[in-house]
Image: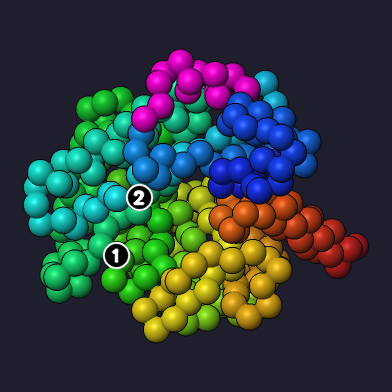
Amino acid sequence: MIKFGPSGNSESFYAAGYEHTEEAAAYVRELGLDCFEYSFGRGVRMSTEKAHSIGAAFGKEGIEISVHAPYFINFANPDDEMAAKSFGYVLDSAKMVREMGGKRVVFHPAAQGKDAREVAVMRTEDRLKTLRDYIYLNGLQDCMFCPETMGKLAQIGTVEEIARFCLVDEVFTPCVDFGHVNAREQGSLRSKEDYRRLLEFLIDRLGYDRMKHFHVHFSKIMYGAKGEIRHLTFADEVYGPEFGPLAEVLRDLALEPYIVSESNGTQAEDALAMKRMYQAAEKAAASCAK
């Protein structure tokens, strides 16, 4: 089934007096959501005992959990020692999500730096081949590793680059951040056809089975000439993208991703709004079929 949930905790979670990640499990379920993404953005500093505690809470509520690996991963770094740290960040994130009872690890692939674009992309691809080997050596191939489309021009992570990286091995599945794509491409996602073109490209490259349960990040994002500036909420009426057309395309293509809201402070509420839009698209399709 398609699943909807927040990345981290909304402002409303803390306003209600909650503090601990374990409490987010019941909070998310009571809203009617299905999944939750925990961020190791600033490093993997969680004990095994804490991971088990979080996993038990989410398992009890039937909420599936994913993690976001540290933000400072850079597989295009020309320094081999720094690249080695990136391998560790991804592998440590995977080991911890397994302790939580989850399977999905989202990570930012790389930054271009001073190299030519293709040089940085090729280095990233080569490093992901090494990461693949480490994944199998550590017995982590049952996890899903999701390189993410990125929102700034200086970052490695166009839709085409992410498809290329995922062709390295089946352990890699795209995380399509539609807000990032829209920001990087100056508002490119407006219609159903825009979304359909993007998703059919990935299906053509990776196959339907690989894409059926892909990972999604979604939020409206302010952007400028260099791409992403900052995340917004669904209340914003200036920047996109809008989720409604995507909901219809996901229904039409029978795709069932995890959809994680990364709205700025209203991520749980906006995840619920997306779930309702998708349910409305399903109901409309069912009515047309009668």
Residue indicated by mark 1: 156
Label 2: which secondary element: loop
In this view, the residue in front, 226 or 187, is 226
Residue 47 numbered mark, or none: none
Residue 220 rendering spot, x and y as whole percentages? 59, 68
The three-letter amino acid code for the residue at tag 2 is: Tyr
Q: Is 122 displayed left or right of 7 in the figure? A: left
Residue indicated by mark 2: 71
The three-letter amino acid code for the residue at tag 1 is: Ile
Q: Residue at x 74, y 38 (%)?
A: 16
In this view, the residue in front, 169 or 71, is 71
Label 1: which secondary element: strand
Residue 141 visible somewhere in the drawing = no
Q: Is residue 288 magenta?
A: no
Q: Residue at x 25, y 62 (%)?
A: 111
User: In the rendered structure, which segment of residues is drawn in magenta?
Assistant: 45-57
